[in-house]
Amino acid sequence: MYSFKLRVSVLLALFLILWTGYPVSATTAIPVDCSAASAILYEPSSGRVLYEKNAHVPRPMASTTKLMTALLAAESYAPQDTLVATAEALAVEGSSMGLLAGDRIACEDLLHGLLLSSGNDAANVFALSMAGSYEAFADKMNARAAEIGMTATHFVTPSGLDAEGHGASAYDMALLAATVLKNERLAAICATEHKTITVNGRDMVLSNHNRLLSTVEGCVGMKTGYTSQSGRCLVSAATRNGVTLIAVTLDCSDDWQTHRVLLEEGFALMRSLTLSLPRTVSLTVFGGTRSEVDAVTEATTVVCLQSDEAVTTKVTVLPYVWAPVEVGDPLGTVTYFIGDTAVATMPLTASQAVPQAEEKTWLETMWRLFQRLFAEAVSR
C-alpha cells in the first residue's frame, strides 16, 4: 500500500528544489585561420560548436559519405554475414579495395575495405545488397540522415562520387560522425591503421588514408575524401582525458594541418568532469522504523566544459515518503547545467530500506511533518 503511495507521489510531488550555484563563463571562440570552404569543431556529448565557418552550407563531401554507408551496413548486418560482389557493383571508377566479381566477403572485412581503403566497390556492394538499387539505397541514407538531424544533407551515391544534388553541411557531417562513434564496431575500424583480410584465398592489405591517426595524439579516425568537385574533405575525431572532439572540413587544401590546429586548440580549451551528487540529501520517512532515508545516485556521467566554466546543480526531491521504503525506490532527480543548458539528469533513489513500523497516531505524524518542513524553511 505505502509503496504504491511512494511511487505515485514521485510522479505527482517532485517539487522541493534545492540549488547549488557556481559562476559560469561565456563561451570562448577558438581563433583559427581556416582556409576551408566549410569547417566545424564539435563536442558531441554536449552538442557544443567550438568553431565554425559556413558550417550549415551544403557542399559535396566526397568519400566522407562512406560514414553513412558504413553506419547503415553495421546496423543491418552482423560481422560475419556474407555479401557477394557483383559485376554491377564493381563497375565504378575511383578508389577500390580490389574486389573481383563473385567474391564472397564478410561484412566486417567489407567495412574495413570501405573505411580504410575507401573502396567505391565496397560501397556499391553494400548498397546493392541492402537495397537492390542505388536509388533505393539513397532513400535509406536520407531517411537515416533525417533521424540523426542532418537537415542540410542529401545523399545520392553510396561512395561519395560526384552526382547532382549530392552534398552535406560540415555541421551535419559532425552529427553523422558522432553517431558513427557510438557504434563500437565502426569506431574500432575508423581507428585502425592497417588490416589484412583474406577474400577467396587472396590476402588484401588495407591501409587507412587518414594521416592524423599517427600524427595527432588520441586520434580515432575518421574518413578522408576527394573529388574534383568537392576538393579535399576530411572528418576527424580524437579523444583525450575523457573529451572527444570532432573536426570537419569541406574543400580544404591544407586539411591535415587545419585539423591538427583545430583539435589542439579545442583540447586546450576543454576539460571533462565526472558528475556526482553535490550534497547529502535525506528525506523524512513517515510510518517507518527510521525517520529518514538518504537519496543517492548510482549513475556516473562525464560532461565536457570549457576550462573556465563550472556546473550548476539542481536537486529535486519529494518532501517526504511513507514506509515501507525499498532500496532503489525513486525519490527525485539531480540535474546538471552549464549556463542555462541542462547537460545531464540522473535519478535519485533510496539508499536503504525502511520497514514499516507500528502505526503511530495522527497527531504524532503531523508533528513530525511540521518539524521537518519548519527546519527546511529555516535553512533556506
Image (tube, rainbow, N blue to C red):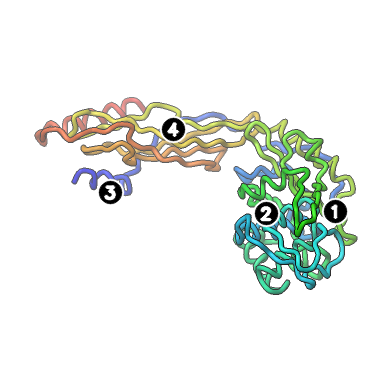
Characterize the local packing of mark 2: few (<14), some (14-19) or many (20 or more) Cα atoms within 10 angstroms.
many
Query: For the residue carrying disc 4, how many other residues have a C-alpha within 10 Å: few (<14), some (14-19), or many (20+)?
Result: few
Residue 199 on image: x %, y %: 75, 57
Tell which tag, 1 or 4, sits nearer the viewer.
Answer: 1
Mark 1 vs mark 2: give the one in front.
2
**Of the residues under marks 2 and 4, which one precedes in the sequence?**
4
Dot placed on the residue nearer the N-terminal end, 1 or 4: 4
Q: Which residue is mark 4?
A: 19
What amino acid is at disc 1?
A: Asp
Mark on residue 251?
Answer: 1
Sooner in the amino-acid sequence: mark 1 or mark 3: 3
Task: Determine the CA span between mark 1 and mark 4.
Answer: 47 Å
Give me the C-alpha separation between circle 1 and circle 2. 30 Å
Q: CA distance from mark 3 to mark 2?
A: 48 Å
Query: Which residue is outermost to the front?
Result: 201
Report the amino acid beneath label 2: Glu
Can residue 52 be seen in this snapshot?
Answer: no
Callout 4: SS: strand
Count all numbered tags in the image, as a single digit: 4
Quarter of the image where one finds residue 343 = top right
Relative side of 365 to 328, left or right: left
**x and y percentages locating residue 106 in the rendered image:** 68, 58
Q: Do the residues bearing badges 3 and 2 touch, measured as CB atoms within 8 Å?
A: no
**Residue under circle 2?**
108
313, above or below 56, in the image: above
- Type of amino acid under label 3: Val
Q: Which mark is residue 8?
A: 3
Q: Earlier in the sequence, mark 3 or mark 4?
A: 3
Assign a secondary structure to mark 1.
loop
**In which quarter of the view is residue 320 placed?**
top left
